[in-house]
Image: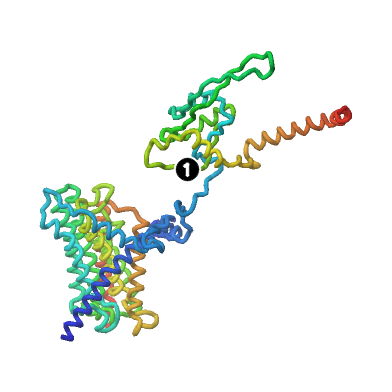
Amino acid sequence: MNDALDVALRLVIVFAVFLVLPLVIGQTEHKVMAHMQGRLGPMYAGGFHGWAQLVADGVKFAQKEDIVPADADRRVFQLAPAIALLPYLLVLVAIPIGPGEGAVGEVVDAGIFFVLAIMGISVLGSLMAGWASANKFSLLGGLRTAAQLLAYELPMLLAAASVAMAAGTVSLPGIVDEFEWWWLPWQIVGALVFFVAGLAELQRPPFDMPVADSEIIFGAYTEYTGLRFALFLLAEYAGIVVLCGLTTVLFLGGWHGPWGAEGLGWVWTLLKTAVLAFVVIWLRVSYPRLREDQLQKLAWTTLVPLALAQIALTGIVKVAIN
Amino acid sequence: MPPIPGSGLAKGLAVTLRTMTKKTVTEQYPDAQPELPPRTRGVIGLFEENCTVCMLCARECPDWCIYIDSHKETVPPAAPGGRERSRNVLDRFAIDFSLCMYCGICIEVCPFDALFWSPEFEYAETDIHELTHERDKLREWMWTVPAPPALGPRRRGAEGTRRARKAAEKLAAAQEPEPEPREGES
């Protein structure tokens, strides 16, 4: 009984984090993006600097009619937003934010495998949406998503493998336990590759070719309205949380910090995640969208070789240490 | 020396970060009134007393948005034995601001300074017919017309003013001795 309560409590907490953090990041994006463009951003909803803007957006989405196009593949069309969103919830369960058993939803021994495999699933949501919408723009967006997934999953896996090699374990808490500060320069290339590939997998600008609104309307999400559309948006921001959390855990040492690693470790994790999320927003504001061929070229001719070089470096250093 | 690879990317990031630390340019309009420049073209006010119903404004208006109705009245002779004069009396003066394109030609062309720009701009209506402002409303706008702004030292008009003042002073200096005898006369 106590075990069940424990599991339930953990899941509730993870679920709450899953609902709150994406909104926080979304609001931060509203504000940071606005100020980077010399604007103020939302100022009215909720009274103080528009803090409740996303709540208001949610209410608006909930009021909208849920439309399924006549020619759409109904079941697949309706299922797609859930497929896009839920994997991130599952990944969040496995991300440790502090040392010990208490600070992770569920310890998964093969953490990296679990996390990367599940993250790949969420892209299927876009693919399903694109295929089921019976719309040429959606289809184009869905296929671009597929191409992007193929191109960027590889460097992401390779970069993660490098860390696993360095730590000698594939468990996420295990990797953070092994972390030393000099891993930072050692794994910096892998970290960059992982982060960039993750951005591409989330279809965040500058890698938002699959949803390029100026040419294919909104890609796979063109036909969606109301709550289902909101779920896709939520999936994007949940994806940012997961990507930043994973990068923190794998490459930035999770709860390790200059001080206070024991009691306040989770603060370090959240802080690093927040900084990375800021970088994600920053990149979106600063860079224009990559063209589809540039996108593929970046993955295959730059990121994959870099990731392979990182693995080689990791191997050499590892052997030299031993 | 070729640029360092990636320096362009870093420059892009620096630009956005710098903009973020600067003050925003947003004006929170309904909460804070905007600071309008002098001679703002908001709405047109009518100073009815100056209007002689010459119709120049209505005729010059490119989109015919000025409506003027008038009739003639006969004024009895000012002095006995004189002849009667006829005079135009304004019945209706209206500007349709749903047509007006704020070119200001009517104001430029008015020979008697009966039309003025006012900076007031908050007169949106839910019914387009309400945008035809009749003479009483145009009169109300007149009270919002600001005094003409002073000419700056570098304006072209300032040079004209300076010359005119110089000429006037010269004239005054030339006529200086004259006033005294006049004083003596009266």
Give the residue pinned by disc 1: B121
Please give left or right for residue B90 compared with residue A104 in the image: right
Quadrant housing the C terminus of chain A:
bottom left
Q: Residues within 10 Å of mark 1 (few under 14, many from 20)?
A: few
- Position in image of residue A120 (x %, y %): 18, 65
Q: Quadrant of residue B183?
A: top right
Quadrant housing the N terminus of chain A:
bottom left
Q: Is residue B2 visible?
A: no
**Relative to residue A316, is residue A67 depicted above or below?**
above
- Position in image of residue B52 (x %, y %): 56, 25
**Relative to residue A36, is residue B99 depicted above or below?**
above
Q: Is residue A206 visible?
A: yes
**Closer to us: A196 or B141:** B141
Q: How many marks?
A: 1
Q: Chain of mark 1?
A: B
**Closer to us: B80 or A243:** B80
* Residue pictured at 37% horizontal, 57% vertical: A286
| Secondary structure at numbered mark 1 | loop
- Position in image of residue A7 (x %, y %): 19, 80
Q: How is the image coloured?
A: rainbow
Q: Quadrant of residue B126?
A: top left
- Position in image of residue A135 (x %, y %): 16, 48
**Closer to us: A138 or A302:** A138
Please give left or right for residue B169 compared with residue A275 in the image: right
The amino acid at mark 1 is Phe
**Closer to us: B53 or A265:** B53
**Relative to residue A160, is residue A180 depicted above or below?**
below
